[in-house]
Image: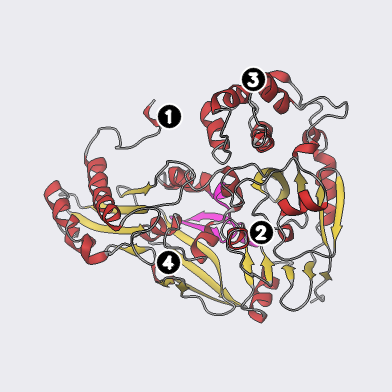
Amino acid sequence: MAPMTIRSELRFILNGEDVVLSDVAPDQTLLDWLRLCRSLKGTKEGCAEGDCGACTVLVGRLTPAGGLVYEGVNACIRFLGSLDGCHVVTVEHLAASDDRLHPVQQAMVDFHGSQCGFCTPGFVMSLYGLWMQTPNPTDQQIETALQGNLCRCTGYEPILRAARSISSYGGTESDPLLVEREAMTARLKALADGARVEIGEGRNRLIAPANLDDFASILEASPTATVVAGSTDVGLWVTKHMRDITPVVFIAGLQELKSIAVKGGLITIGAGVTYSEAVATLSEHIAALGPLIARIGGQQVRNMGTIGGNIANGSPIGDTPPALIALNASLTLRKGAARRTIPLEDFFIAYGKQDRGPGEFVEAVHIPVPAKGEMFAVYKVTKRRDEDITATLGAFRLALSADGMVADIRIAYGGMAATPKRAFAVEKALLGQPWNETTVEAAMEKYAEDYAPLTDMRATAEYRSLAAKNLLLRFYLETTSSAAPAQVSRYEAA
């Protein structure tokens, strides 16, 4: 085997310029570097936590199936060390060579989509990413693309009118990313030299592994290193909590963790697959997961955040674990060359503690597709519908016998305990009983045996307890009635 090539430089492309950096702090954010080191002030800092979208830039990367793909990301929580081999595009790159505004920018001007202008570059970049993928988007596609962008003075209707009009301005013949696509693809391929990136010494190290085996060996040798995939959680450790996360291992570029496979009723998703990459497959085979993913952060967060990271961080309010536990998902954990597979529900031991040894990492999650006739639903309760932290989340999978008895049921919640947790007492009260309102109301009294939720900034303990019970009742009503679901979006209602 050839010796591992180690490169002590970070290489990427900024707009049209090749960038080579040999002095990069492991926790340096892209936003700070753009503004402080490159004086690219169009990218703004608003919230510093991935909520407001003022810092939105596009990051282009090569994918095995889709070629060169550009996605909007939050520069405020995206670390510089995760960008090796990528193309970073800021709002300054949009104008054509003759200094005319880009169609996205011109539409925002013509339809009065800006007042103070602070948030405008972020809106422009989000709409630019949408326009490149979908030149004539529907209103729903526009609103989804802008979930992660907040405006406090203009109001959204002028921005929506601008978004609807972009293609009427033309511009594809002079758009920089469309014109440069073939050349940029070649430039990015030239950057992909298969080397490990390692900058700094001791604790102050930044490492981007060459491949999955290299990552396994790095983590085995440095088990206390912080592993960063999408940084949608770890980014806030730095920007909000000022935590020392060094040394840092960046794994967003590992294609081996990006696989999605469906075989024999089992969906296997690599731990590095983002929400945006997973949503099509999950929605096709387990329809209820599509609307759940659409409510996880904004589009920028979904483009960065990974399902594996959502599990590995062990948050009691992580959105995917309760749903996956209800589906009886399992995890493959790896340390060095050794692998083991465990039920997902056994991974969560206590608050901040998971069944993961030093140097071990989540490699893949395996999700059984519900059998024909089984019913599955997941409900997320928040103060606002989009871009909000979960107060409580309930997931239900039900199988009925031919005579209407509960043959199997799995119920899991987030936000009700120190970890995502099954409702065993409630399940026991339902199992083998007729699926009717009397049975459900009796089972609702068992919630106190399963959960003793806390009061915090998101909700009171009393609210969580009542909401959890009512979610079971909602599930019952939606599985026994032909009426419309209890809560729908205006698009679903239409």
Q: Earlier in the sequence, mark 2 or mark 1?
A: 2
- Kindly identify the amino acid type of the residue bearing the numbered disc 2: Ala
Residue 111 is tagged as 3
Q: CA distance from mark 4 to mark 2?
A: 22 Å
Mark 4 element type: helix
Residue 491 is tagged as 1
Would you identify the image quadrant in which residue 360 lies? bottom right
Residue 426 seen in render = yes
- Is 189 in front, or is 121? 121
Residue 389 is tagged as none
Q: CA distance from mark 4 to mark 1?
A: 34 Å
Q: CA distance from mark 2 to mark 1?
A: 34 Å
Q: CA distance from mark 3 to mark 1?
A: 24 Å
Q: Earlier in the sequence, mark 3 or mark 4?
A: 3
Q: Which residues are magenta?
A: 254-278
Q: What residue is at 65 percent from the left and 33 percent from the top?
A: 127
Q: Indicate the position of residue 480 as horizontal and vertical percent values.
A: 21, 41
- Kindly identify the amino acid type of the residue bearing the numbered disc 1: Tyr
202 left or right, relative to 424: right
Q: Check the picture and name the quadrant holding the N terminus.
A: bottom right
Q: Indicate the position of residue 268 as horizontal and vertical percent values.
A: 51, 59
464 left or right, relative to 257: left
Name the residue beneath numbered marker 2: 252
